Amino acid sequence: MTDPIEVDENGKLKCSIEYTLNKVGGKWKLVILWHLAYDGKQRYNEMRRLLPGITHKMLSQQLKELEGEGLIVRKQYNEVPPKVEYSISEKGLTLKPLLEEMHRWGKEQWD
Amino acid sequence: MTDPIEVDENGKLKCSIEYTLNKVGGKWKLVILWHLAYDGKQRYNEMRRLLPGITHKMLSQQLKELEGEGLIVRKQYNEVPPKVEYSISEKGLTLKPLLEEMHRWGKEQWD
DNA sequence: CAGAATCCAGCACGATACTG
DNA sequence: CAGTATCGTGCTGGATTCTG
């Protein structure tokens, strides 16, 4: 079987599983992506309601990082009051199998 | 689509993705499981070699937690010098699809 | 060989107040 | 409404030494 640890162009060891963890690890990112993937686009405060317990700091930080990775898209409407919509990108959609497995396994192992 | 957030028997909100994250999240667990799933059983010091940079503390801690979850099996031979073998359990094998997706996505997104 | 025991640093994550 | 800006804090993870 393929080893997850490989050598990059600088000769430094890298691991594809670690790579994925770096992009979508942490407490919130996969849950955020799940909602955008399956519930469709959401406004900022809608996201907050979907993520019980998240703070402003974490939500805006995670959204910004995910946008930076190109996994989600931020669309701003110049209106008053302000309106912003977040949606999943094409690249983000490639995470669907992973999201589904995370969901399936958690559900299945539930006691 | 099924919402990942559900209500448990105590009426507390729970999320199956968070659940999975709690079991196999963090920096090392999925990589450890990957090796045990695809490289077969390993001794303690063999595991260390497979995980560049891991410390004694992290390795033994993660192994203990994974064993506590029933995801891996620790087999101790009463010999001198000591010999211990870690292997993946039946329950741990149910994570294979997840491991493969983590690996596949990381490999694919590699620049 | 396979850990356990300490001690410690950094940062992930959180609480709260403020703002265009 | 959709965020910043500060200010914490605890826990994850690391370095090192000791042991059966």
Image (cartoon, coloured by chain):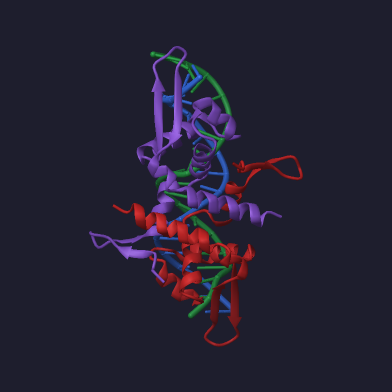
Chain colours: A purple, B red, C green, D blue
In the depicted view, which residue is nearer to us: D15 or A79? A79
In the orientation shown, which residue stands out farthest toward the front? B1
Relative height, residue A7 to residue B86 (above, below): above
Q: How many marks?
A: 0
Residue B91 occupies quadrant: bottom right
In this picture, residue A88 sits left or right of residue B13: left
In the orientation shown, which residue stands out farthest toward the right? B9
In the orientation shown, which residue stands out farthest toward the top? A80
- Expressed as whole percent of the image width and height from the top left, the position of residue A23 reads 40, 47
- Expressed as whole percent of the image width and height from the top left, the position of residue A63 reads 44, 35
Relative height, residue B99 to residue A87 (above, below): below
In the depicted view, which residue is nearer to us: A85 or A60? A85
In the depicted view, which residue is nearer to us: B50 or A16? A16
In this picture, residue B33 sits left or right of residue A8: right
- Which residue is found at the position 60% from the left and 43% from the top? B4
Relative height, residue A32 to residue A81 (above, below): below
- Which residue is found at the position 74% from the left and 40% from the top? B11
Quadrant assignment for the N terminus of chain B: top right
Residue A84 occupies quadrant: top left
- Expressed as whole percent of the image width and height from the top left, the position of residue A26 reads 49, 46
Residue D3 occupies quadrant: top left
In this picture, residue A110 sits left or right of residue A66: right
- Expressed as whole percent of the image width and height from the top left, the position of residue A72 reads 41, 37
- Which residue is found at the position 39% from the left and 16% from the top? A78
In this picture, residue B76 sits left or right of residue A37: right
In the orientation shown, which residue stands out farthest toward the left? A10
In the depicted view, which residue is nearer to us: B35 or C9? B35
